[in-house]
Amino acid sequence: MMNKYTSLWVGCLAFLLLLSSCAKDDYFVDGGKAKAEYDGTILQYLESHPKFDTIAQIVKLAGLEDAFTKEEITFFAPTDEVIKRTIGNLDVGGLNADLYRAGKDTIVVLADVPAAIWKRHLMKYMLKGKYLLKDFPQLDFDLRPLYPGGYYFGYNDDLYNIGVVYNRSNGIKYAGYRQLSMSYVPDPSNPNSFISAAVASSDIQPTNGVVHALAIHIGNNNIGETFISSASNSFGLGYEFNNDVILEK
């Protein structure tokens, strides 16, 4: 039989649990475990995800539907935010500001960019074959002679350095989580000069390959211990896309 003090304690505990439950309901939604497999093609995955539906439109404009539905590829997927930042507007810069200053028509719809340009730069994010995180070698930006990652030719024969960065845990080097890094090498004669992007989510596996979703660079040169370049926020991993559109206009 509980005395009044025990009863009071139990009552307080029940009240705190009730508050905790309410707070969880208000501020926390359990999305469950993330599924690595997706029952559909890479293009269908992009179309189904609100962060990639603009990229899915660009796949179609570029005439790359077959690659994204029938071929086995690895796609380092930029988000729709990358397209938004690349096109920009007259006030905050980007492609439209450059076009305006050059006295040329700005981009209003995606189809205003020639299909060949979309295709050329979208292929910069593609590898032939299926590569999961475990298939890439270790990369340490501070010890590149020991852990250089690996060099790969992309879908259109551009050169990339791709590797897995082993982050720290409790100050212990290489004991933390693994993170994939993808770097575009603009000049193959200088393979140590590159534009790096960090992968936010890796090993998403549709039926015809794998998608690694790229992170957005926000005011810092690192995500974990993965070095990233602000140029990775631009479509095509740099400013070549802007230059191609301006010259075409």
Image (tube, rainbow, N blue to C red):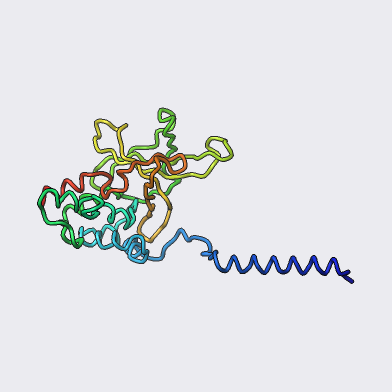
Residue 102 in percent (x, y) is at 11, 48
Q: Is residue 174 above or below residue 204?
A: above
Residue 163 in percent (x, y) is at 40, 40
Which residue is pictured at 50% across the width and 40% down the height?
167
Q: Quadrant of residue 3?
A: bottom right
Quadrant placement of the N terminus: bottom right
Q: 101 left or right of 193? A: left
Which residue is pictured at 44% across the width and 41% down the height?
164
**Which is more toward the observer, 53 or 98?**
98
Q: Quadrant of residue 188?
A: top left
**Which is more toward the observer, 216 or 197?**
216
Can residue 125 be seen by looking at this rendering?
Answer: yes
**Residue at the bottom extreme, as displayed:** 1
Q: 61 left or right of 8? A: left
Can residue 70 be seen by looking at this rendering?
Answer: no
Residue 185 in percent (x, y) is at 28, 38
**Which is more toward the observer, 14 or 76?**
14
Which residue is pictured at 40% across the width and 48% down the height?
199
